[in-house]
Image (tube, helix red, strand yellow):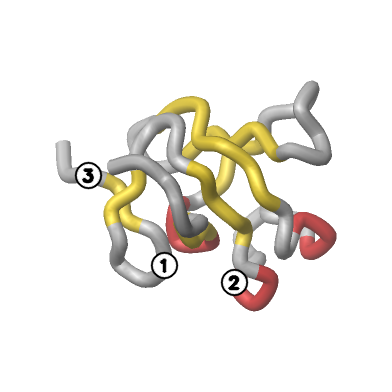
Amino acid sequence: MAGFTDYRGDPIAVDDRVRIAPTRTRRGVPAYLGGEVGRIASLGRSKVTVVLDRYPDRPWVVPPDVLVKVAGSTA
């Protein structure tokens, strides 16, 4: 399986810190999540599970092309 990349084309992996890009919210991603920061919990076949800092009790499943890696992430 090919690795996941964010909307800039940078590789992303489990435990990376990511931000949901405000201008890229679409395909079932609520607009109010734009700009939220969190950590990748798992990678699925075509989607990514993200646990956001503001909503730690509700993981969000989003397409990887709405994410951007936050500076200081691993990998």
Q: Amino acid at mark 2?
A: Arg
Residue lying furthest left = 1
Q: Are marks 2 and 3 in contact (CB under 8 Å)?
A: no
x then y, percent, for residue 52? 70, 39
Q: Amino acid at mark 3?
A: Gly
Q: Which numbered disc flags the more N-terminal residue, 1 or 2?
A: 1
The earlier-in-sequence mark between 2 and 3 is: 3
* Front residue (pair 14, 74): 74
Q: Determine whether the residue tagged by mark 2 lies in a helix, strand or loop.
A: helix
Residue 54 drawn above or below residue 59:
below
Callout 3 environment at 10 Å: few (<14), some (14 to 19), or many (20+)? few
> What percent of the width, then of the height, locates residue 72?
44, 51
Query: On the picture, is 75 further left or further right than 46?
Result: left
Return the residue nearer the eye: 53 or 41: 53
Query: What SS does tag 3 mark?
Result: loop
Q: Which residue carries the number 2 mark?
A: 24
Q: Residue at x 61, y 67 (%)?
A: 21
